[in-house]
Image (cartoon, coloured by chain):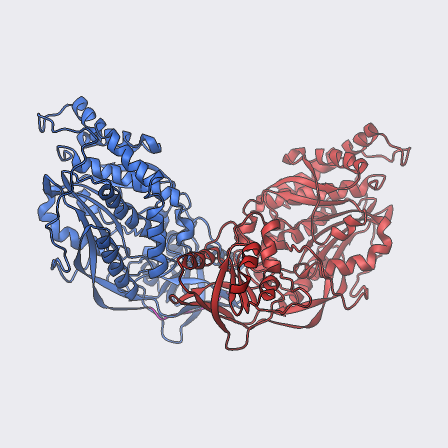
Chain colours: A red, B blue
Amino acid sequence: MFRRAVLHILLSSFLFLSLLSLSDCHVPPARTMSHGARPMPNKGAKNVSNIAAEVAGYTGVAKQIIDLAVFGVAQNRSYRRLADFTDTVGNRVSGSHNLDRAIKYMYSAMTKDGLDVHLEPVKIPHWVRGKESAEMIVPRAKNLAILGLGSSVGTPPDGIQAEVLVVKSFEELKQRASDAEGKIVVFNQPFVSYGETVAYREYGASEAAKVGAVATLIRSITPLSINSPHTGWQDYQEGVKQIPTACITIEDAELMWRIAQRGQKIVVKLTMGARTLPDVDSFNTVAEIKGWQHPEQVVLLSGHLDSWDVGQGAMDDGGGAMISWEALSLIKDLGLRPRRTLRTVLWTAEEQGGIGAQQYYNFHKGNLSNFDLIMESDMGTFTPVALQFSGSDAAKKIMEEVVKLLAPINTTKLEGGAEGTDIALWMKAGVPGASLHVENSRYFWFHHTEGDTMTVQDPGDMNLCSALWAVVAYVVADLEDMLPR
Amino acid sequence: MFRRAVLHILLSSFLFLSLLSLSDCHVPPARTMSHGARPMPNKGAKNVSNIAAEVAGYTGVAKQIIDLAVFGVAQNRSYRRLADFTDTVGNRVSGSHNLDRAIKYMYSAMTKDGLDVHLEPVKIPHWVRGKESAEMIVPRAKNLAILGLGSSVGTPPDGIQAEVLVVKSFEELKQRASDAEGKIVVFNQPFVSYGETVAYREYGASEAAKVGAVATLIRSITPLSINSPHTGWQDYQEGVKQIPTACITIEDAELMWRIAQRGQKIVVKLTMGARTLPDVDSFNTVAEIKGWQHPEQVVLLSGHLDSWDVGQGAMDDGGGAMISWEALSLIKDLGLRPRRTLRTVLWTAEEQGGIGAQQYYNFHKGNLSNFDLIMESDMGTFTPVALQFSGSDAAKKIMEEVVKLLAPINTTKLEGGAEGTDIALWMKAGVPGASLHVENSRYFWFHHTEGDTMTVQDPGDMNLCSALWAVVAYVVADLEDMLPR
C-alpha cells in the first residue's frame, strides 16, 4: 500500500494502446440463471423492497460462488497462484526487470485462464536503491540496518559521515533548528498510526534539509520490529535541497535516542547508491469477462502488481491482485456472465504514487458514467471483516443488501469509507467505490519490509476474500440497474 | 537462554582465584527490624502456622522493598542500568572483547554501588562467526538471511555450492536419505514449541551429515519472523563429519519448500567464515551482601552476562542479570542485612552450555549444604506471572507463604518446576531452586536475533521483576531456618 498526502503525478504519456489485446469477439457462455433474478419492470424507480427482492434473488448464485471458492475445486487456488507468482518473480519495484516479468507472467496466466486480457501502456519512474549501508561510529561501532526511501538521492560514493541530532518530532526539530546544521537528523518519532506517523517518512528529509541537515535517518513506520527496516515513498519539497534519506529500525532509533539523552556524541556514516534513472515503459494489465447486455458498463476489480524491492510483495499487493483475478475465474468457472463487463485491472507503479492508476483515469475518465463500481484490495488479504463502500445513500442501501449474500462466510458488514490509492480519483469523481476490510492488525509489521512474503498469507483467508470479492462484483454487475450516483 | 538436551561441559581449569576480591571486612549496617520478625524458639520443628506467622512478619519489609522498587527513587533503575550497560557494551558472545568489557563494567558498577564484588575465573569457548552469506542461485537469484550456529565449522573460503534437499522432519530426512548425498539439507520443520523444535537447530547438522549432506540450513526456532534469522548453540555428534550449519528465516525455508514441492531444482551457495579458536580466560562476576548471622549460608540470585553476538542481549539475559543486581541494591538501600548472605552471580558463557555455571558448581559444591536457595532469571524480565520453585514439599509450603508477600504487585502464584541452565546442577543435587515466570509469549520472536534489544524491555515490568526478586531473596535469606531439603 502506498500512502501519500499529496499526489505528484508525473505522466509523460497519455497514449492508450491496446497492445496485445485479444479479440473482443468473446463467445457468450450460456447464462446461468440459477439465482432466479429476473428483469424488473420499473427501471430507475425501484423501491427498497424491490431492490431487496432483486438482490435476494442472487442468494443461490452467491452460495455457488462461495462453495466453489471455499470448499470446491477452486479452494486455495488464489493462494497457490500468489505463491507461484511471487516465488517465481520475486519483488517488483517500478522500473525493474522483475516488474516487466510480472506483467508478462500475469498476461500469460490470465490468458491461459480463458479471460480477455490486454495491456495498457504507462511511463513509470525508475528509482534504483543501489548499495547502501549505515554504521554508528561513535560512541561505538554498530551496524545500522537501513532501507533507503523511494526517490531518495544517494550520498557521494564515499558516504556522508556526520554527527547525529536525534529528535522525536517535527516540533522538536524546529526548536533545535540551530543544532541541525551539518548533522544527520535521526527521527525517533513514536508510532501512533500509519496514516499519521508516515508523515515523517514522507517529509522528514525536506524538513531536515530546511534547517541544514545533510541526511536523515527515520524510524520505520511500524508498531513492531525484529530489527526490521521499512522502505516506502518520500517526497522532496520543491525548492528544498534534496538530501539522502533512509529508514532505520525502531531498535536503532531508540538506541541513538537513549545515547543522545545521556549527553553522548553520536557519529554515523551513511552510504547510499540510490539514483533515479529515466522513466521506463510499463503497463496496466487488464482482464475481462464482457457483459452480455451492457458490455460498455464496467464493474472494475483491482490490486497493484508492483511492490517495493524487498520481500515478495505478497501482502502488498500480490494478494489484492490475485483475488481480483480469482474473482473472474470463479465466475467464469461457474459459466456465469453478468449483464455488465467485469474488468480486473492490475495497476503498475502504485508505490510511486499511483502512476498506473492516474494514467488509466486520464484515459478512461471520458467514460465515467459507464463505471458502475470500482473496487480495490490493497490492505492485505487476511480474514475479511467487512466491505468498505463509498457512494450515495441510495447506492449504500443496495450494497447493504448485496453483502447479506455473504452470510455463508459471515462477512455481511458494510462500512463507509472505501480506500485505495488507485481508485481514489474515480471515487472523487463520483463513481461508487469499494475496498476490502480485513483483519490486518499485523499488516504494518510486514509492510514494505523483507518480511512481506507468502509466510504472512493464509490460503483459507484468501478463499474467503476471493469469494467476497467475486460475489460483490458479480451481483453488482448483473443487477438490472447500475448503482445510483 | 541456552537450551541443550545434553551438556558437554569442557572445562580446562577448576582453579578458583578470588582475583580482585574486595575485603570481606564489611561493616555490618544497622539492622532494620521493621518487619517485626523475631527468632523463633523451636528450631527445626516449626509447624505450618508458626512458619506462616514468621513469614507474615515480613509483610512490612516486603512492602518497603516493593514501594522502593516500583514507586520510590529506585523506580526504573534496573531498566536504566540495563540500557546503559547494553547500549555501552553491546552484545557479549563467549570469548569476545565485549564480554571482557561487560565483566569489567559490571565489576566496576556493582563496586560503586557499595556491594562486595569479586571475580571467579573460568576458561570459556571462543567461537567466531566470521563473514557469512547464503544465496539461492537456482531457480532464481535471492539472498537468504542467515545466522551461523555457535560451534559450527565454516565452509571453504569460496563457499559450498550445491543442490538443495528440503525436508520437514528428521523422519522425512531418513526416508529420503538416498537423496541427501552431496546436498545442502534445508530443514523446514514447523514450530511446535522451543523445547521441542530446537532439536533441529541442535542436531540438524549431524543428522544431515550422517546421510551425506555437505551443509545444513535450518528454519529458525520461532513462531514469528520478519525475515529474521536466529542463532544459538548446535551439537556435533562424536564420530560424525562436521558440516557447516546456519539458521535461515521462516520465510526462506518455506520459499524453498514450496519451490521443491513444485518439482523445481534449487541450488544454494553458502559461505561461512566460522571457526573455533582456543579457549580464553573469563570470569563469573559475584556481588554480595554478607549475612549478619550465617554469612557462610547463601541465597544466590543470578542471570547470565554473556549473550549471542547479535542484538544487545538485553532480553537474553541482560534483564536477568540486572534484576539480580537490583535486588541487592534495593535491600542495601533500605539498610537491610539478612541473616544469611545474599549473593548475585552473573554467569559467563551460559550460551555455550552453562560453562561458567559448571565451573562454579565444581568449585562450590563441597559447600552444598550451605546453599539455601538458588535463583535464576533467564526467560525475560517482562510482566511477572509467578515464581517457579523446585524443592521439597516442606520447602514449597514455606515458599507459598513467601509469595503471599507479593500481594501488592499481584504475583502471589507459586508454580512447580524452576528452570535455568545455570542452576540446574544445584537443583539436581537437591538445593531448592527458583526462577522467574514472566508473560513471555513474545520471547521467542526475539530470542537470539538482532531484535533482542532494549526495545523489547519495559521499565515498569522490570520494576516488578526486581521487587519480586528482592522480596523472595531477602525473606528466604532472613528466615530463622534454611529451607528444608
Residue that protrudes farthest toward the bottom in the picture: A157
The C terminus of chain B sits in image quarter: top left
Q: Is residue B146 above or below residue A161?
A: above
**Location of residue B329 in the rendering, given as x and y in whole percent from the top left corner:** 25, 45
Asked whether the viewer can see residue A440, the reply is: yes
Left or right: B293 in relation to A98: left
Please tell me in which quadrant of the rendered image residue B66 appears.
top left
- Residue appearing at x 54%, y 64% in the figure: A178
Please tell me in which quadrant of the rendered image residue A286 appears.
bottom right
- Total numbered badges shown on the rendered structure: 0
State the residue in front, A485 or A466.
Answer: A485
Left or right: B340 in relation to A384: left
Asked whether the viewer can see residue B140, the reply is: no
Is residue B269 covered in magenta? yes
**Location of residue B141 in the rendering, given as x and y in whole percent from the top left corner:** 53, 68
State the residue in front, A96 or A65.
Answer: A96
Q: Magenta stretch?
A: B264-274
Left or right: B179 in relation to A483: left
Residue that protrudes farthest toward the right in the picture: A42
**Location of residue A395 in the rendering, given as x and y in whole percent from the top left corner:** 79, 38
**Location of residue B241 in the rendering, given as x and y in whole percent from the top left corner:** 29, 66
Q: Is residue A81 above or below residue A483?
A: below
- Residue appearing at x 30%, y 49% in the figure: B322
Q: Is residue B433 above or below residue B249?
A: above
State the residue in front, B214 or B225.
Answer: B225
Left or right: B210 in relation to B13: right
